[in-house]
């Protein structure tokens, strides 16, 4: 009997070794990793620079001291984040939902400083911001929210890619102080908003002096071929929650602020016991430095194009394939039916991936994947999709009379 709380529907595989973009299970079977721990393992497995930095940090005996003291590794990590974001201040935490919690608190403080008694934040259908009470309240999924009511108030939900809906809220609701958006929705099904939409949304924020808060926990940090999606759109946000790939596999998150949000947090307004400890920040520095040195942003663009083009060609004319979409190494293959079974089918064929939004196969490979490995991914996945789609679609259960 396992004493681990039953909060995950785990697959019957345990990985014991990794190298590059490859994993091995307890029986010695080899797998190509198309998921990177859900966009976490930026540098893949066993990257020499990350291994060296973490080994030296652990050997020093200083992995945690607390934020009561200066932490040189934290300063170095913050400097690097400021450089790639163009923003000014970094609050370190441990996860994406903590980074989004911090962003929500920044927005509320900002609103109160402007004299708004009940500050509200615009959020979007199909969004995912985390599973704490505030972040699941901001999330646009009833499946995530169900059973945890009463939810946290202060969120106004609109459809993605509809600027008129945002303008309508602005006209009738003077409590709005911020917009919180995933520039690419990950859990929601790899939905990529038009860059014109993101720029229009930023213009509305500027017009009303709202904070533009870009949740790039999953889509940021080089995955789309730029450091961040907002850089594709050509502007800067006010608040930027980060996590996942920031530490190359070590748990670390950050809430980055600038522009209208600069200086909102002051001593005593927020904190985190483990946030920004020397071990996590060593991982941040090593990961970001390796990404620059190895041009992993350019690699994400090239390999992502190879995978998307390869899948489009291999699946051409296959009934049941709705769309192959994404940016860089953030790719979704939407089918016309629920396809959770494909996860197990891919595992049997030596490929790690997952399914989100019921019918979207999600690919988030390590950014060190080569084009040859990207072609291998296509060669494994395309036949699996075809076999799955060739099966008869299960009939929906009929309603009982009476």
Image (cartoon, helix red, strand yellow):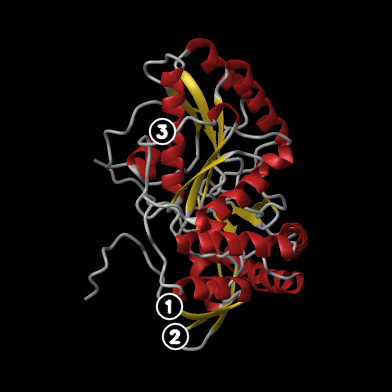
Q: Please give the name of the residue rendered at 22% of the width and 70% of the height, measured from the top-left corner.
A: 3
Coordinates of residue 113 in the picture (x, y in percent): 44, 19
Q: Find residue 368 and report its image quarter.
A: bottom right
In the image: residue 115, left or right of residue 248: left
Coordinates of residue 194 in the picture (x, y in percent): 69, 36
User: Residue tagged by mark 2?
Assistant: 26
Is residue 392 visible to us here?
no
Q: CA distance from mark 1 to mark 2?
A: 6 Å
In what element is the residue under mark 2? loop
Q: Residues within 10 Å of mark 2 (few under 14, many from 20)?
A: few
Residue 179 lies, with reference to residue 173, above or below; the image says: below
Q: CA distance from mark 2 to mark 3?
A: 44 Å
1 or 3: tag closer to the N-terminus: 1
User: Residue tagged by mark 1?
Assistant: 14
Residue 217 lies, with reference to residue 60, above or below; the image says: above
Marks 1 and 2: CB-CB under 8 Å? yes
In what element is the residue under mark 3? helix
């Amino acid at each position: 009997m396992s004493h681990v709380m039953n909060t995950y529907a785990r697959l019957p595989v345990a990985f014991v070794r990794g190298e590059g973009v490859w994993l091995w299970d307890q029986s010695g079977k080899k797998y190509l990793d198309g998921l990177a721990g859900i966009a976490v393992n930026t540098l893949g497995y066993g990257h020499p620079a990350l291994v060296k930095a973490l080994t030296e940090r652990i050997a020093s005996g200083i992995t945690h001291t607390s934020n009561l003291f200066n932490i040189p590794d934290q300063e170095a990590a913050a400097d690097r984040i400021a450089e790639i974001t163009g923003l000014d201040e970094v609050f370190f935490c441990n996860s994406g939902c903590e980074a989004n919690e911090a962003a929500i608190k920044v927005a509320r403080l900002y609103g109160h400083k402007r004299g708004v008694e009940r500050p509200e934040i615009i959020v979007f259908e199909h969004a995912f911001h985390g599973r704490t009470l505030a972040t699941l309240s901001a999330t646009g999924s009833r499946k995530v929210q169900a059973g945890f009511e009463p939810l946290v108030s202060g969120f106004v939900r609109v459809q993605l890619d509809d600027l008129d809906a945002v303008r309508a809220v602005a006209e009738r609701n003077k409590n709005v102080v911020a917009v919180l958006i995933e520039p690419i929705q990950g859990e929601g099904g790899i939905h990529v908003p038009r860059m014109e939409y993101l720029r229009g949304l930023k213009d509305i924020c500027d017009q009303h002096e709202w904070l533009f808060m870009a949740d790039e926990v999953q889509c940021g940090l080089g995955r789309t071929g730029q450091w961040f999606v907002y850089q594709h759109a050509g502007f800067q946000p006010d608040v930027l929650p980060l996590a996942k790939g920031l530490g190359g596999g070590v748990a670390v998150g950050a809430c980055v602020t600038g522009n209208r949000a600069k200086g909102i947090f002051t001593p005593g307004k927020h904190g985190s016991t483990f946030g920004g400890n020397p071990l996590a920040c060593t991982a941040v520095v090593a990961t970001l430095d390796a990404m620059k040195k190895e041009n992993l942003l350019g690699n994400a663009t090239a390999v992502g194009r190879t995978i998307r083009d390869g899948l489009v060609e291999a699946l051409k004319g296959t009934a049941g394939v709705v769309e192959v979409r994404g940016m860089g190494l953030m790719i979704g293959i939407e089918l016309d039916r629920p396809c959770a079974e494909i996860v197990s089918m891919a595992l049997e064929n030596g490929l790690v991936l997952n399914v989100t939004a019921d019918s979207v196969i999600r690919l988030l490979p390590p950014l060190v994947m080569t084009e040859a490995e990207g072609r291998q991914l296509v060669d494994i996945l395309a036949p699996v999709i075809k076999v799955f789609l060739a099966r008869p679609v299960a009939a929906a259960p009929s309603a009982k009379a009476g």
